[in-house]
Image (spheres, helix red, strand yellow):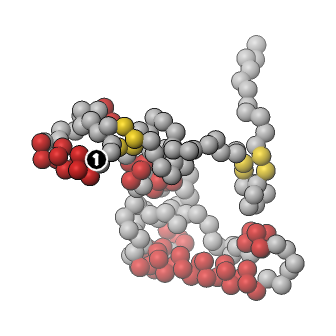
Amino acid sequence: MFNSGIQPGAGAVSQSFDMIDRWLTNVESDPSPAPLEQKIINDRPADVHDVCFNNNGATAANVDASQEIPLNSPACTVGPVAIAMRSPRIVAGGPLAENVFKCQLKPLNTLDADYNGAFFDAGQQARLAAVFPNGVCDWTRPGVGQTDAVLTTFQNGPGGVPLGPAPVSIIIP
């Protein structure tokens, strides 16, 4: 479930716990010899899916299925990218993939273009320097010890399969 970026209300939290409880109960009750990964795929309740609500889900009525909006709908004012923007790392310029565990640092420079022209008075500059004595994340560089990820898809469930070659553009006469 996605909401407008505000902390989820009691109705949304309650519905989320109910959904995961039903899903896990189905998995635990599954007598099939399938591996756990497959049971998780097979035993998802039919009504459990990603959805957008343009409210905080304060009450059960706010998370009523009749108010669901598909994530890819223009009516969904939050969408996956907007939700991801809540991450302090992404707001600070980090990658949407959230795949940097420890960033490389650069000196704190309040005149840097990264701050979009924001003005920091002397007191604010001193406080920033105290909080970040070794510098701030340099999001233009890979993370410390970061290696390339193996590209996969989850098409066939957990573990996925490697992606094929990248598509190539061709000019059609």
Query: In which quadrant is the C terminus drawn?
Result: top right
Identity of the residue furthest to the front in this view: 134
Q: Secondary structure at mark 1?
A: loop
Q: Position of residue 138 (x, y in %)?
A: 41, 39
> With 91 as the anchor, is 40 left or right in this view?
right
Q: Position of residue 170 (x, y in %)?
A: 74, 20
> With 129 as the anchor, is 94 left or right in this view?
right
Q: Position of residue 171 (x, y in %)?
A: 73, 17
> Who is closer to the viewer here, 107 or 71?
107
> Which residue does the numbered mark 1 point to in the structure image?
133
Residue under the point 77% across and 73% down: 36
Where is 26 relative to 103, above or below? below
Mark count: 1
> With 96 as the anchor, is 161 left or right in this view?
right
Q: Position of residue 63 (x, y in %)?
A: 48, 73
> Who is closer to the viewer here, 35 or 128?
128
Residue 65 occupies quadrant:
bottom right
> With 129 as the anchor, is 63 left or right in this view?
right
Identity of the residue furthest to the top in this view: 173
For badge 1, the amino acid type reads: Pro
